[in-house]
Amino acid sequence: MTTLTKSEKIAIDIKEIAQRIKKQLKKEFPDCKFSATIERYSMGQSLCIALMAAPWETILNGKKYAQLNHFTLVRMPGWNNGTQLTPQAWKVLKRATEIANYYNYDDSDATTDYYNVNFAIHIEIGKWNKPFRKI
């Protein structure tokens, strides 16, 4: 993939971004099922990528739902937001985060409490109302 500029990232609608991400994940991980949903709200938008089904377990203690920290997924394997991931789950969800970040920008500045992103990213295993399933 070529690098997109900030203006090119802004020009792509969040719905199109979600479709592109889901298509790329299906291509790279054909044995897995993903959900990519969007939410638009005043002054922003978010993208939620959920791993819904895979041929292996995702969480070591057998839980079927977890909300994960996308910053931690990119930086360190295994433990995430109080959840211990299997190596396969970490690899897949790390890649999902990398693909989402390709379409995102972050001009935030923590020192001045300034938040400016193309969209907020949410990474999940399963959904609160539809748990992950091993296939």
Image (tube, grey):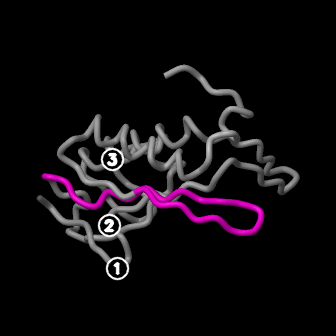
Judged left or right of residue 3, residue 18 is left
Residue 3 covered by magenta stretch:
no
Question: Which residue position is annotated with label 2?
Answer: 126
In the displayed structure, 50 sits above or below 94; it is below
Q: Nearer the viewer, residue 128 or 68?
A: 128
Cα–Cα span, label 1 and label 2? 8 Å
Q: Is label 3 or label 1 in front?
A: 1
Judged left or right of residue 75, residue 26 is left
Cα–Cα span, label 3 and label 2? 14 Å
Question: Which residue position is annotated with label 1?
Answer: 129
Residue drawn at the location 69% of the way across and 68% of the way down: 41
Residue 56: x and y in percent read: 15, 53
Q: Is label 3 or label 2 in front?
A: 2
Mark 3 nearby-residue class (10 Å; few <14, some 14–19, many ≥20): many
Question: Which residue position is annotated with label 3?
Answer: 90
Q: Earlier in the sequence, mark 3 or mark 1?
A: 3
In the displayed structure, 63 sits above or below 72; it is below
Q: Circle 1 sits in a helix, a strand or a loop, which is it?
A: loop
| Residue type at tag 3 | Trp
Residue 46 picture quarter: bottom right
Q: Which residues are magenta?
A: 36-55
Question: Furthest residue to the top?
Answer: 2
